[in-house]
Amino acid sequence: MDSSVTRLFLPNGLTIHLKEIHTAPIISHWVWYRVGSRNEVPGITGISHWVEHMQFKGTPRFPASQLDKAISRTGGSWNAFTYLDWTTYYETLPASHIELGLLLEKDRMNNSLFDPKEVESERNVILAELEGNQNEPRYRLAEAVHRAAFDSHPYRNEVIGSQEDLHRIQRDDLLSHYHQYYTPNNAVIALAGDFDSQGMLDFLTTLYADIPSAPDQVVKVTAESPLLTSRQVEMCGPGTTTYLQVAYRAPRAVDPDFFSFMILDSILCGPTSLNMFGGGGTSNKTSRLYHALVETELTVSVRGGLQATIDPYIYKIGVTLRPERTIGQVLSALDDQISRLQQELVSSDEIARAAKQARALFTYGSENITNQAFWLGYADMFASYGWFTGYVQYLEQVTPADVNRIAQTYLSPLQRVVGTYLPDGTKGGCS
């Protein structure tokens, strides 16, 4: 898989990854910046996401009114995402039109306008987005659980930011953040598709040669102390549905425990997709919690979630309760399944099935040209492309003893956050 990837590091620090795929006349082009909510402090939460929005508001060469039309005319697609550790932009275009995407992203790296009127307009857009999120019970619950799971690490903050900070941030703050982090030595360019690697390297080298590097961005994040006691979060609100979310601390992506945790997740809840861009899915109906919670009609659904991050993050298990069931009943059943993983070695057959499901989901998320370009840059945000190419091999090395150890190490009922959302009028809950 790795043999077809060409890598280059320009003198200004820009990293370039190229993968030729000649199955269709399409090229997917991604630009990744090592900046996300991890780079934010109280007072400017949400600034990385806001800067992402401003990147669609035009440059002198590519006015905002022309950007979307120019992409649409080619039959291509484009978008952007901001997360904990990174911000990324992509265009998937017919190969004959890829120059448009290359020129656009080069211009957005150092020439975005940040027009004051657009800044204020986008402030209102993001505040409305936040208000919409906070009207959704599961978002509110996840937000509260995040804040309870971390005492000081910026992972505790939502990527969109707080309402107070979104009112406080000004244009100069956005520009400063943009100039600090949108630099070639803080960026990774990844392309996959129908091109000649040497020709593409020559073009990109010429295109970006005039942008100087900037001082390396070293983010000083104090490591979180372990959770020593269980923490409880209870919220009430409108609706008729009760939700439960349980969060445990989880290892960072480069920790050897991460891959054992992926197998545990597949056994317990069904495999997690690491490709946040999409790319298919598999059923979780063979997972232990599906059998224990959904098939027994305690819950409507159950899902786990493990993400690849620079620093230790959290492993979340979320469930939607049936109306006649209680939080106590569901937690008891959940804890029983985790206790079994801590006390008994899983069978080799169950390990093999979990690994097969995780591999299948990984493959679905890596198969088309856009997803292959995604992975070229994504893995660099928390590890390296070698992490991606070795992923299946790492999963195959996990043993029953590894899963048992992970359950004992990370899934203690005394070291977690238990969050509940109770609809107004629920017996024993809100009034």
Image: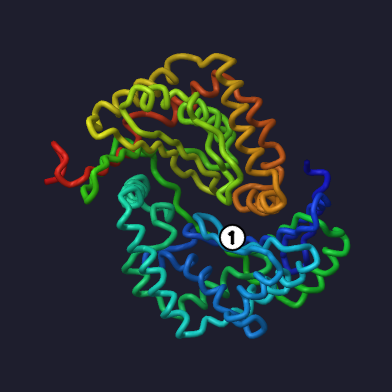
Helix, strand or loop for disc 1: loop
Which x, y percent locates residue 394?
A: 65, 31
Q: Is residue 325 left or right of residue 280?
A: left
Which x, y percent locates residue 193?
A: 78, 55
Q: 294 or 303, which lies in front?
A: 294
Q: Residue at x 47, y 69 (%)?
A: 50
Dividing the picture into quarters, in which one does residue 245 lie?
Answer: top left
Q: Residue at x 39, y 43 (%)?
A: 225
Q: Residue at x 53, y 68 (%)?
A: 52
Vertical placement of 87 versus 5: above or below?
below
Which x, y percent locates residue 360?
A: 63, 33
Q: Residue at x 54, y 60 (%)?
A: 81
Which x, y percent locates residue 314?
A: 44, 42
Vertical placement of 144 versus 32: above or below?
above
Residue type at the position of mark 1: Arg
How many numbered callouts? 1
Residue on which disc 1 sits: 34
